[in-house]
Image (cartoon, rainbow, N blue to C red):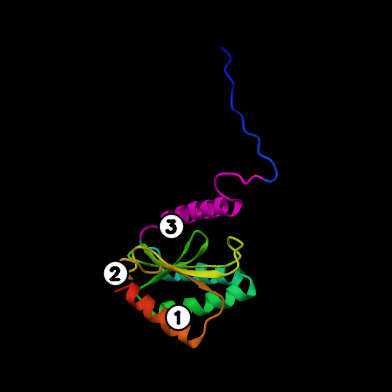
Amino acid sequence: MTTKTKTTAKTADQSSVGFTDEERAAMKVRSSELKAEKGRGSRAAKGDGESEVLAKIAEMADADRVLGEQLHALILASAPVLTPKLWYGMPAYARDGKIVCFFQSAQKFKTRYATLGFSDAATLDEGTLWPTTFALTTLTADDVARIGALVKQAVG
């Protein structure tokens, strides 16, 4: 009886199963963030997180940077209880240590638009189906009003 061993060879036209290079990089960044937070202790100053978020926004490509700056100001104005911090290398806003909302630049995962997302800690529940992530290209006055209202609702 002959036993055949199944081998798989990855060819150029096959996509690999698992994480992309960008996803692996994001996980490494998150690991570094957790180590830095641990080093600062449980009472890390809000200013530390905010300066890190602003520095990350400043590094972004023009379109993403403009959106990031607008969202940062809007989120903090709408919900001053939120604390800015980095989360997977992107700006995020937490309450009592839990991420409520986050901004992901288009360049982060090489997508065609940036996103604003809300975690399960956000109280946006409406019926049995509600959106938690929004695609962003620019912000209109209506968008600003809608996002402001969503952020206020998210923190209850």
Who's the residue at 42% across and 58% down the image? 40
Who's the residue at 43% across and 57% down the image? 37
Please identify the quadrant where the N terminus is shown.
top right
Please identify the quadrant where the C terminus is shown.
bottom left
Residue 9, percent across and down? 65, 35
Q: Which one is in front, 118 or 12?
A: 12
Query: Residue 93 is drawn in which quadrant?
Result: bottom left
| Between discs 2 and 3, the one toward the N terminus | 3
Who's the residue at 37% across and 81% down the image? 149
Q: Which mark is residue 74?
A: 1
| Between discs 1 and 2, the one toward the N terminus | 1
CA separation in Å, label 1 and label 2: 26 Å
Q: Which mark is residue 127?
A: 2
Q: Amino acid at mark 2?
A: Gly
Element on which disc 2 rests = loop
**Magenta-colored stretch includes residue 7:** no
Element on which disc 3 rests = helix
Give the residue number, with chain letter if any, for mark 3.
37
Residue 22, percent across and down? 59, 55
Who's the residue at 56% across and 79% down the image? 138
Q: Residues within 10 Å of mark 3 (few under 14, many from 20)?
A: some
